[in-house]
Each structure stands twice: as structure tokens, then as C-alpha cells.
Amino acid sequence: MTEETEEVPAIPQEKEMSFLEHLEELRWHIVRSTIAILVFTVGLFIAKDFLFGTIIFAPTQTDFWTFRMLCKLGDLVSLDFLCFGDFPFELQSRQMMGQFMMHVTASFIGGFIISFPYVFFEIWRFISPGLYSNEKNVSKGAVFFVSLLFSIGVLFGYYIVTPVAVNFFANYSVYAEVKNQFDITNYVTTVAILVLGSGILFQLPIVTYFTTKVGLVTPELMIKYRKHSIVVIFILSAMITPPDPFTQIFIGVPLIFLYQISIMISRSVIRKQAKQEQQEQQEIQLRKNP
């Protein structure tokens, strides 16, 4: 009598990709990301009046949302200096291709900002297949939270930091006879640095989360070097903002707040890891002593 052996279905295994196949995969992710950026760039280039009149030059107008809110606050607390008058400066283009190049540059930067969630999604699609299942579980929602923090940072840079910088430099004068006439290249570059820089710096909680997961950072370490970190934060703020203390404070204080949140995130990650390790130890003990 022969024993019938039950066939066990083979477990499908993911096919390992060669180096060239990885490069080909990366190429298509880059191509799709580039197409997304170019689509929005062309759209903004065509919508020139909206891009410059409604977005880029809006912080130079006294009816900008931030200035209107400050004026309302000034009326409530009886502080007249919070209501700003006309800004005494002019924008000029001193190069033959200055306006055209700023049109292209501003359109590209705007296209990148709008398409950033999709660009990061493409990057994540390339990275995630190389992660272990437990790493994929802990990184769920990465695209959402990275995009959310980037958007909050961009809005903060545009509605808070940029108006403060514009107001400071527009009204700063060493002598009454010296008129402020800013070059359009310098203005657009400054706005882009403030907005993009804020979006990048607001990724601090995400960076803390993943560095804690891999064991590079602990809450105790962050608390120990908190004073040093505050100094570094203000150095970074000085690097991405104009050289005035008010703008640096406006971007530095929220980053210090994000640093405190990052400490809590790191502490939460450590607690979850300790709980998971405890559960695994209990399971091992149950297997040894059924």
C-alpha cells in the first residue's frame, strides 16, 4: 500500500531584479515625476497673471491675507503699528532676460511644490519594495504625512515668514534719501528659498520617527542635546532666511516647537518597540513552557 503524499502548493516568491532592471525601474519613476512637474510648470507658465499677480507679488500688497489679519489683531488690542501702509519699494529687472528667466524659474518652482506629493509617492514606490514587511507596516502613511508636513511648511513660509521678511526689508532704510529698488531676480529667489526651506525643515518629525526606528536617535539623546539643537535650528533658520533677526525668530520658534513634538514622537516609538519586544518574549516563553 502506497502512501499518498499531499502536494504542498509552492509559495510564490518575488523575482529578484538585476542591477540594470533596478535602474530601468528608477528611470521610469524619474520620468513620471518629471512629467508631473513639467505639466504643472507649463500650466503656471501659461497662467502668468495668476502666478505673479495672485501668488508671488501678493505679499508685497497691504491687502495680503497676513497683513489684514495683523491689522484686525491690532484693532482688537489697540496696536496701530500692526496695520501696515504702502511698502516703499519698487521691483525692477536690470537684465535683458531677467523677466523671462524669472517667469521660467518661478513656474518651475511652483510646479515642483504642487507636484511634490506625487513626486514623493513615486520615490516611495521605488523604495518600498526593498523594505521588510515589518518596515512596511511601521512606514504606512509615510506619503501622506510627508506631504502634509511639507504643505504646512510651505504655507507657513508663504503666509508668515515671507510677509515678515518683505515688510522688514521694504521699510528698512539707512538714510531717507536712499530708495529701495529691489531686483526681481533677488525677490523671487528670496521667496522661493523661504517657502521651500520651510517645507523641508518641517519634515523634522518624520526624520525623527525613522531615525528612532533604526536606533540612531532616542528621546534621552534629544533631551540631552536640546540646547545644542536649538542653536542648530537658528543656524539653519539664518541660512534659509534673509539676514534679519525677526524672520529667523519667526521660523526658528515653530521649529523648536516641532523639535519638542519630535521628542514625544521618539518616546512613543521607543515605548511601542519595548511593548512589542515584551510580547515577543512572552510568546517565546509560552512556546518553551506550554
Image (cartoon, grey):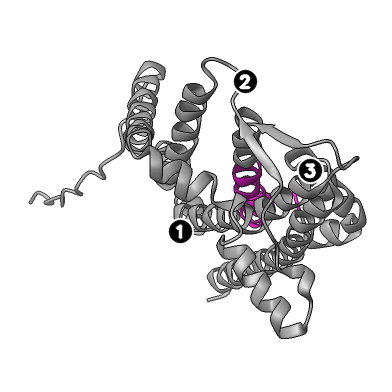
Q: Residue furthest front?
A: 177
SS class, disc 3: helix
Q: Distance of mark 3 from mark 1, alpha carbons?
A: 27 Å
Q: Amino acid at mark 3?
A: Leu
Confirm whether residue 135 shows in the render.
Answer: yes
Q: Amino acid at mark 2?
A: Arg
Q: How many marks?
A: 3
Residue beneath disc 3: 236
Q: Amino acid at mark 1?
A: Gly
Image depth: mark 3 or mark 1 in front = 3
Q: Position of residue 252 (x, y in %)?
A: 79, 55
Q: Nearer the viewer, residue 98 or 14?
A: 98
Residue beneath disc 2: 94
Q: Nearer the viewer, residue 97 or 219?
A: 97
SS class, disc 2: loop
Q: Which residues are magenta?
A: 194-217
Q: Position of residue 20 (x, y in %)?
A: 37, 16
Residue beneath disc 1: 141
Instruction: Work out whether mark 3 precedes mark 1 in sequence or the reverse, and give the earlier one.
Output: 1
